[in-house]
Image: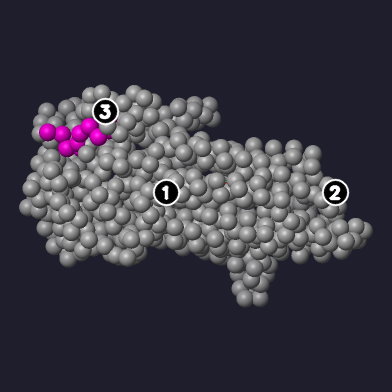
Amino acid sequence: MTSSLAAIPDRGHPAGDSQRQQTSTPTNQSAKGKEQAKSSRTGNPSSGGNDRQPVFDTDSLNEQSPLLSPSSGSGEDDGFIRAQALDNGEDEHQATKSVWYLILLTISIGGLQIAWSVEMSNGSPYLLSLGLSKSLMALVWIAGPLSGTLVQPYVGMLSDNCRLSWGKRKPFMLGGAAATIISLMFLAWTKDIVGGFFGVFGADPESAFVKNSIIVIAVLWVYILDFAINTVQAAIRAFIVDCAPSHQQEVANAMASRFVGIGNIAGYLAGYTDLPSVLWFLGDTQFKDLCAIASIALGVTVVATCIFIRERDPRLEGPPIKDKPGVLAFFNKIFTSIQRLPPQTRKVCEVQFCAWIGFFPMLFYTSSYIGEIYAEPYLEANPNMTPEELDRLYEDATREGTFALLIFAITSLATNVFLPFFIAPTYTTQPGSAVVSPDEGGPSSLKDYDEEKSWLDYLVIPGFTLRRAWMLAQILFTCSMLCTVFVRTVTAATVLIGLVGITWALTLWAPWAIISAEISRRDEERRQQRAQRMLSPTRGMDGYNSDEARELESGEDAEAADQAGVILGIHNMAIAAPQIIATLLSSVIFQIFQKPRGEPGDHSIAIVLALGGITVLISAFFIHRIRDDPDVPADIMSAVEDGDAPSRPGTARSRTRSHEQLPRASLERATLVRNKSFGGMEY
Ligand SMILES: OC[C@H]1O[C@H](O[C@H]2O[C@H](CO)[C@@H](O)[C@H](O)[C@H]2O)[C@H](O)[C@@H](O)[C@@H]1O
């Protein structure tokens, strides 16, 4: 396999291509990249003697390239602007971004996570306090997986086809955030609003009718909230893919996972604090204050991301695919998109599908599991506790369980913060600074790179790729979950749950990094192909021979393009749908093994957790089947994996060689690029 890939020549620089004229000049790529970076720092618009070379102002958060800005506004100009933008063979969106850019790009997912954690940790107790019965709680729990399965692919599809000037994803981020904030507010104030409304007509707020109305409306708001949160989540994930360059997808998604971790812990800590005594002006109950904090965090972070990070203007991408309206057409589209998933993405989805059958019980039943262990000796010692004594015991037990979840969240965040420094990067180069071996005019020694190396670069463990780390983390999860059946002390159980925080950290990072890198890379290839088409001498000013050709080709282009929104939506289906399966399976197991409340010896949760651990082991096997060298174009990789490697090496470019085949200089430079992003050094 390796040899067939080694022979793949440089697809990005075909002979006779004007791009080649730029990239194959005696000035090697790395030097050129450095010069661009330097000129962007100094503000010197030197572009290697080419007037049309864009200046990559990588320090600038808001990429204000006049080449990409549709300032003239008219649709007729778009083709010309696009031709200009692509004519120079460079894409400013692929320029390496600073750590501040990555922070602003991903911070909104942290704001969103606070909303998630408030709902997850406090939603159930709040609904129970309104009088909802425990048996009906399942109706509420299913809202999350259901909305994740349906909403994310739908929002992905809509946003892929959105052609508003301010971007494809921002309308959904802002609209979804507004809907989330409204839902949080209504949910927290349901009792006041509904009680007040019926009070106007003279209804007694303590009557069964008013109480039931409050419960029904609160559950309705939980559904609306889950649909709104999933809208924002879908849009933010696709926004990250769109706005981070291909070679920084791993870094950008690592940053996103850190914000998810921070958001989780912030949500937890807020839950622990007695908020009404401190933030009385936000609301008179804990839940009202939590919802207000989550709303502020979400609003501020989403607006910050939208202000500082600029999307490509989607109008420059040509007309959207004309999807048929209707539910059937939507499912048809999803079905077709599943069949056309890029190969790495397909494998990640298989992993996620198995893994989330196991993750769901871990996320939802951990506190009860720890609680059962805590309560067991007390129940054995005193088998005849009164209901009040039992309530008190289970309250203490829940506190122990919540503490374990806090340890889980801290381990997870610590892993997200520190692990990336040890991971060997799988994305090798920055586009536009292609892998160039010494005989292709590349550096003959590592001297250039050594000058820039910092101590962080020495932390990287060779061969410890993100994929391998992810696989090991799944195996760790399996071992920990199998141990839950044997563990009998709260401390040991807390250690097990703390350990799976490592798995959770990688779950929040690795799948998105792999998928995003693949989508972004394929998108970049498509853009370059289109740029070449634009430069064809037989083309008109806008790159097309005629109106019909423009329409036909842009339609085909859109069909052929990977649609980040739909793909990420399908990936989320692979996360959310198994949660529904897990809910059903675990309820069967509970039916068989559960003991009545207050009776010792109930190990039903541990059985569910252990079985979940086995499904995660299957997912580890699927990760084993994913390749570490995603730089190889996906179509070729899939052909190679299918034992059908192209015998005529005519399509790939040199920067797409496999991980093992790359010159050491390229890997070192990739590490440098990545570590600088992590460490906060500016470009
Ligand atoms: O993927 C990270 C997120 O995982 C959970 O969300 C997933 O499950 C939700 C239902 O439980 C579903 O609505 C969502 O679409 C899925 O992505 C978790 O609840 C989030 O906190 C976490 O960020």
Colour pattern: one colour
Comparing 106 with 394, the one in front is 394
Q: Residue furthest bottom?
A: 278
- Which residue is depicted at the point 63% across and 65% down? 271
The residues tagged by marks 3 and 2 sit, at their Cα atoms, a distance apart of 66 Å
For the record, the magenta segment spans 4-15
Residue designated by label 1: 466
In the shown orientation, is residue 112 left or right of residue 317? right
Residue designated by label 2: 596
Is residue 408 rendered magenta in the image? no
Magenta region, mostly helix, strand or loop?
A: loop
Comparing 465 with 124, the one in front is 465
In the shown orientation, is residue 49 left or right of residue 232? left
- What type is the residue that disc 1 sits on? Leu
The residues tagged by marks 2 and 1 sit, at their Cα atoms, a distance apart of 44 Å
Is residue 10 rendered magenta in the image? yes
Packing grade of label 3 (10 A; few <14, some 14-19, many >=20) is some
Residue 391's spot in the image, x, y percent?
83, 61
